[in-house]
Amino acid sequence: MPMAVRFLHTADWQIGKGFGTVPGDKGAALRNQRLETVGRLADVANQQGVDAVLVAGDVFDAQTVSDETLRRVMEKLRRFAGPWVMLPGNHDAALAESVWTRLEALGARPDNVHAALTPDILRLPGTDLAILPAPLQRRHEPADLTAWFAAAETPPGVFRVGLAHGSITDFLPAEAERHNPVERTRAATAGLDYLALGDWHGTLRVDGRTWYAGTPETDRFRSRAPGNALVVELDGPGAEPRVETVSTTRFHWHTLEHRLAEAADVAVLEDRLKALGEPFDRHVVALTLTGVTGLAQRVAVDGVLEAWRARCHFLDVDDSGLATAATEADLAAMEDSGFVADAAAILRRRRDEGEAAAGDALQMLFAEYRRRRTD
């Protein structure tokens, strides 16, 4: 009678991924964190006492990552002495020449790291796990590479765990289902105890035996439930899996929209940023501002943004939809500005007399006045 088995399911590390929209050192920190999170996964594996770690594809972001990066990843894996099973995905497919062949040429792969490069049953030493992998041997496959699972014979009493990288058909959004299909009922038709999937970057339950782990380190604004790994426990072959979500991400990505109309809206904006939670330097934020402000309000907004740029890891602001319009108080403040005051007074009088172009010219004058004050 097999003992219960416990393993860690993770995917989509994409080591070497660039962050072109986050410039300089802050982008480099996001790239480096993906490697640090591998160490975090090893620590979780030790803390949870798992029998193995299954990586469902896209360990690397590209075949062109450096030899140093390959070695550094392998060094991180040494922190968990149990078996790691690594599946090639669409970013690191098992080509004739690939990151996997380079690892072998470098002699950098530890003995406990198993690269599942062919569709063959992999029995993990010291466990009752039989891994059925569906490695991608090119970036895109039109056929379901998990189809062979159904006919694969495993010894009685072992746990049948599938490992694949692709899109569950008729389940994910249409744009995610163009390549590398996986039949939605595969776990049932192949008699799997569990099907560990990669490719979708958020943690997602397909059914009781089929899950996407998602990327362990959040890497984009619009992912759903990213930044986790899954601890899976099976009491016996055929038993319903128990799946626990473990947060592994360091950085949290947010998309915020805020409309400004009244002076109080500036304080509301700051409250929304505070609500992200400490430590603030773990947040990557895309903020869109809309509405209309006066000069004093706009100065207050700019002050809030500068403070939060220093607090957040990265704050990107789109204020193209935020206009600055002169209030009567703003125009009055221009009266001590010499020639500008004279011009403003003339334009105000013409505007009040019903000359529409004068109103537009007054706003243009105010915009230039504001620009010079804030330069």
Image (tube, rainbow, N blue to C red):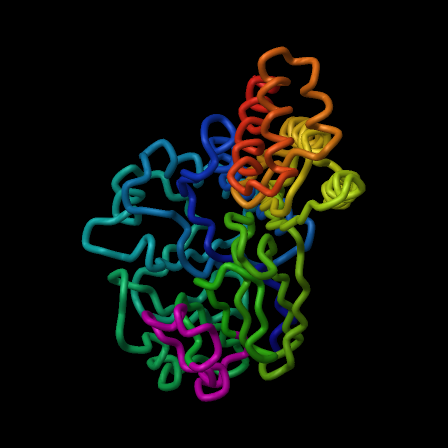
Magenta stretch, main secondary structure class: loop
Which quadrant of the view contains residue 351? top right
- Position of residue 320 relative to residue 28, above or below, is below
Image coordinates for residue 108, horizontal then vertical, percent: 36, 39
Percent from the top left, x then y, of residue 76? 50, 39
Q: Is residue 38 left or right of residue 176?
A: right
Quadrant where the N terminus sits is: bottom right
Q: Is residue 217 visible?
A: yes
Quarter of the figure with residue 119: bottom left
In the image, the segment drawn in magenta is: 170-194
Viewer-side residue, 6 vs 251: 251
> Does the rendering let one see residue 311?
no
Task: Give the x, y percent position of residue 337.
Answer: 65, 13
Residue at left 80%, top 42%?
Answer: 264
Count all numbered tags in the image, as a single digit.
Answer: 0
Residue 125 shown left or right of residue 285 in the figure? left
* Residue occupying the far bottom of the picture: 189
Q: Position of residue 311 (x, y in %)?
A: 68, 30
- Which quadrant does the C terminus fall into? top right
**Picture residue at 50% right of the left edge, 80% below the top:** 192
View extreme (front): residue: 353
Q: Residue furthest left?
A: 96
Q: Is residue 354 above or below residue 188?
A: above
The reply, left or right, for residue 15 in relation to residue 339 is: left
Q: Nearer the viewer, residue 101 or 260?
A: 260
The quarter of the picture where residue 228 lies is: bottom right
Can you say whether 215 is above or below 206 in the image?
Answer: above
On whether residue 347 falls in the magenta region, the answer is no
**Of residues 48 and 308, the one drawn nearer to the viewer in this rendering:** 308
Q: Residue furthest top?
A: 338
Q: Residue at x 48, y 57 (%)?
A: 11
